[in-house]
């Protein structure tokens, strides 16, 4: 253990507490953090608060990084959801239910948890009914096209191929809604962080003919 000299010349390694504050930092005297007179308790706590918050968020995010669609919904309680996707082995173009865009945006619960395929214009993190909506500024979060938009989640690789401008695609995935997909989650990142409504947890994407 490293021994250091407390103020007044007495060794901290001996377990003795310094009785004097006469020496300065530049002459080799080291003071404990709590003894520094110019830093109040409130100031110290203000400096340390971001560190504690970072540790708490890191622990929570490690449990909620990617949602497994096979887990019961109540397993998301307290999680920070940063990503989600569907498994292409169990949800794919071969067994997906074809659903029209309007039916998907107007669904009232019948499609929840079902593997579907829907066609539209994919732009960034959402599928749109028409290309014009997808190409507007803030198209993924603006309230205007909300009823003509389906949010998308997927693996990092899947989201990397998402076009920045509207391109016609057929998307396959598990249907859900922002409001009910992760009940009890402390925070949901991605599309649902900014808006609500229908979403697809993607498993496959196919460029459609114009």
Image (cartoon, rainbow, N blue to C red):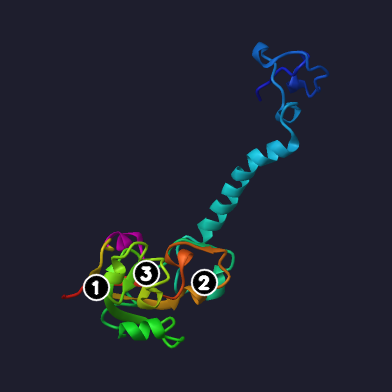
Q: Which residues are magenta?
A: 152-161
Q: Is residue 128 magenta?
A: no
Q: Quadrant of the C terminus?
A: bottom left
Q: Is residue 24 left or right of residue 181?
A: right
Question: Mark 3 = which residue?
Answer: 152
Q: Is residue 154 magenta?
A: yes
Q: Is residue 180 left or right of residue 115?
A: right
Q: Is residue 27 left or right of residue 184?
A: right
Quarter of the image for residue 153 reads bottom left
Question: Mark 2 = which residue?
Answer: 182
Q: Quadrant of the N terminus?
A: top right
Tell me which residue sits at (45%, 76%) in the image: 177
Tell me which residue sits at (67%, 11%) in the image: 27
Q: Is residue 88 visible?
A: no
Mark 2 or mark 1: which is in front? 1
Determine the CA span between mark 2 and mark 3: 15 Å
The circle on residue 147 is: none
Question: Mark 1 = which residue?
Answer: 169
Quarter of the image for residue 14 reads top right
Classify 10 Å Cα crowding around label 3: few (below 14), some (14-19), many (20 and above): many
Depicted 38 relative to depicted 80: above or below? above
Label 2: which secondary element: loop
Classify 10 Å Cα crowding around label 2: few (below 14), some (14-19), many (20 and above): many
Image coords of residue 151 (percent x, y): 38, 71
First in sequence: mark 2 vs mark 3: 3
Tell me which residue sits at (52%, 57%) in the image: 61
């Amino acid at each position: 253990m490293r021994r250091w000299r407390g103020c007044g010349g007495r060794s901290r390694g001996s377990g003795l507490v310094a009785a004097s504050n006469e020496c300065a930092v530049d002459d080799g005297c080291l003071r404990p953090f709590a003894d520094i007179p110019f830093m109040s308790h409130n100031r110290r706590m203000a400096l340390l608060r971001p560190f504690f918050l970072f540790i708490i968020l890191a622990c929570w995010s490690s449990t909620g990084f990617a949602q497994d669609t096979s887990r019961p919904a109540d397993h998301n309680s307290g999680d920070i959801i940063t990503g989600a996707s569907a498994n292409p082995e169990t949800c794919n173009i071969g067994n997906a239910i074809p659903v029209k865009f309007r039916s998907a945006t107007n669904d009232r619960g019948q499609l929840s948890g079902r593997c579907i395929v829907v066609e539209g214009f994919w732009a960034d993190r959402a599928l749109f009914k028409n290309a014009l909506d997808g190409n507007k500024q803030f198209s993924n979060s603006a309230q205007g096209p909300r009823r003509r938009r389906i949010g998308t989640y997927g693996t990092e690789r899947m989201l990397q191929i998402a076009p920045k401008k509207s391109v016609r695609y057929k998307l396959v995935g598990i249907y859900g809604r922002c409001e009910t997909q992760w009940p009890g989650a402390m925070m949901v990142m991605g599309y649902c962080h900014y808006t609500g409504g229908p979403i697809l947890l993607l498993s496959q994407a196919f460029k459609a003919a114009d």
